[in-house]
Amino acid sequence: MLLFVCIEGYANHTKGGTMNYEYLGQGSNANRVRYRITLYLYTSCLLTNNQFDPTISFTFFNAATSEFISNDAVTYEDSSNAQNCTLQTCYPCISPIPLICYKVVTYSIIKELEKNTSGYIVSYQRCCRISGINNIQAPSNNIGDTWTVTIPGTAIANAEKNSSASFAFNDTAIICEGGNFNFDFSAFDRNNDSLVYEFCNAYAGGGSGNASPNPASAPPYASVPYSGSFSGAFPMGSNVTINRVTGLVSGIAPASGVYVLTVCVSEYRRGTNIKIAEVRKSLHIQVANCQLTQAKLNPEYISCDGFTLNFSNNASSTNIQTWFWDFGVAGSTSDTSNQQAPTFTYPDTGIYVIKFVVNRGLACSDSTTAIVKVYPGFFPDFTVAGQCKNTPIQFRDNTTTLYGAVNFWSWNFGDPGTLADTSRQQFTAYTYSNSGSYQVSFVVSSNKGCIDTVYKQITVVDRAQFQVSNDTLICDIDTLQLVAVGAGSFLWSPNYNISSLTSPSPLISPDVPTTYYVTFTDAFGCQGNDSVRVNVKSFVTLDAGNDTTICLTDSVLLRPFSDGLYYTWSPPGSLSSLLIKNPVAKPLASTTYYVTSSIGKCNTTDSIRVRVVPYPLVTASNDTLICFGGNAQLQASGGSSYAWLPAAYLTNNFIANPVAVGLPATVRYVVYVRDTLGCPKPSVDTVWVRVYPKIIADAGPADTSIVEGEPLLLKATGGDNYLWSPPLYLTNAGVAGPVALPPGNIEYTVRVSNDAGCFDTDTILVKVFFVQPGFYIPNSFTPNGDRVNDLFRP
């Protein structure tokens, strides 16, 4: 099987890496040791200036106290690209083939250290990772990384002469989503010590506010915040594990995306359990959206509800061209299919071996087998008996099966307060210490391999639940039956005029108010208590209420005052109900209603009269049309009091005939008319007073000049009708534009009106100049927009 691993990178730095050390011998004296500390960082093949640090810092700490020792600048030694083959000839059974390219940047320093018992911790920190990492809480691009290695001290004999294990660089591969994969995280050790591998927490380091801590922060180092069910021990979910001996990571790849995966290899002195050192390798692994050409089935298929099953390949790939299924029916040649997702009906119950082949006889062929068990007629169920906390609640298996026998039961009673809320018995009991709702799950299986889970929500109560009669009334000459409902026993008290203390339905006949108490006990010892208050009356109190008046077509709610239990009204026809305490009456004429109130054999009767009067008959004046700023006479009749709304422009809005004065616009007046002799509610009418638009008369420029003997065309605007005065020297005084030929100065007034008689006036002064023939050139003008001497002209 071909395997691929995408290594995804940081937004501005690395894609992972590892730090180790190499013992180089004694230092400048017998108390000093020389080491080469090397950091291998995986970065993008295409780096920008912001994504690559030519010089970084290694920070040294005392391994026991975390005391700062030194901070050393380290310049990179080498950077080489590693890239997978992307040709289809390399991986003919994978599609599509993602491009993988990463650069291994090497930083190395030779450091001479004093011998000590605890050793040293070397660290380098950098921020930040990329956004959207699947197994880290968002925002992952605010989380950095810490690369660190511990150099052992002299507390372990000769440990200071040890060289750490080194991981191999074999990371140009791709993991396809949902596919099986193997990924080698093995390391080699120069000292031939024993190596043990395990998943471990990835470290955070640096942040958006301090991307390159210099020096690095002191240990211990915090883990990155894993998201959901992911953790350092399960960085790619529970389906991916690591071999502790070989370092082989394998399993079923999770959903596509980026995952932080860290492997710690512990170095033990061969033949002992003495741990000398530990080295970490951390990668950003991207699971690609690619497919392997693979035949993949469930390990086992079981049909417990029929003979027909549906099959499909659990792996998808665009490279699959053909499908072949053999459903494993012995002696049959017709139990095959070439469909991609076939359906097959087995002839009988039993166990079958199915074989599935993709690309049969072609390149990239693959095959697999699976077990099929056909045993229909499996119906899991269970019943629950009991209801109270602190008493055993019984759980009973009610499963039926047509084939084989039920042989496995697993109960989980859903009690969050304990882990001991389980059972493997067929019939069992569980006692809840608290009331509330619990989801019970019941897993049941048969010896034929059928298995299913049943879920039921149960309610546990503080006390036994049962029903009892409501508080009630009886007449002192009556007998009443109390009723309690529940599966169990009852005990009543007090023993006062009651037919039985243990009956669920005893008869009582108290002659004074009495409270009867009942204790209920179910079959599981759960108890509950309740009571019935029985008030005893020697007569029924009833007052139907005061007589009332309503307006015709209105309704009224009848509200008698009474301690009775039952009511009967009459006459019918205008009542909403004859048998309730508070019916709605809607009579069309004045009516007397009779009501009888009873408690058992005691009863009494009373009456109420509902008088019906008509609404006031209101009449308002007709709608009217007036000139702008004019007056309108309003008029209403039919009542004894009046209210006009709105009150604006009215001389008095509380009289029948107000005048609307000086209306500038149309108004809708509403009059409310009340009559103290009849219905107390008002009748309403409306009068519209509509107003003509204001007429603005314009006779032309206020003053104009002409020369003796020169005719002048007057031009008035603003309405429909025009009348000039005086009518002297005008061709026609009744038009908008007559011609005037006055012998001397004169002032004309024009009256402009509409057909309704609304009018306005304006004037114009005509000045006549007496001059000799020739041109008159003014020596000044006033261009101020008032239409007088605004133009300079001869």
Image (cartoon, rainbow, N blue to C red):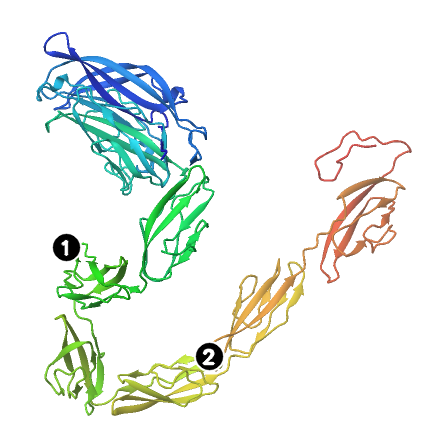
Q: Is residue 1 visible?
A: yes
- Disc 2 crowd rating (10 Å Cα; few below 14, some 14-19, many 20+) is few
Quadrant of residue 794 in the image?
top right
Residue 738 image position (x, y, % from top left): 84, 50
Q: Which residue lies at the image location 14% right of the left edge and 13% below the top edge?
A: 33
Please, which residue is most extreme toward the front here?
331
Which of discs 1 and 2 lies nearer the camera? The answer is 1
Residue at disc 2, secondary structure? loop
Q: Nearer the viewer, residue 636 or 445?
A: 445
Q: Amino acid at mark 1?
A: Ala
Please, which residue is most extreme toward the top here?
28
Residue 464 image position (x, y, % from top left): 17, 70
Residue 544 image position (x, y, % from top left): 33, 86
Q: Is residue 117 left or right of residue 381?
A: left
**Residue designated by label 1:** 420
Which label was assigned to residue 554? Answer: 2
Q: Mark 1 or mark 2: which comes first in sequence?
A: 1
- Disc 1 crowd rating (10 Å Cα; few below 14, some 14-19, many 20+) is few
Work out how far the residue at label 1 is from the one at label 2, CA to CA, in angstroms: 69 Å
Q: Is residue 245 left or right of residue 567?
A: left
Quadrant of residue 319 in the image?
top left
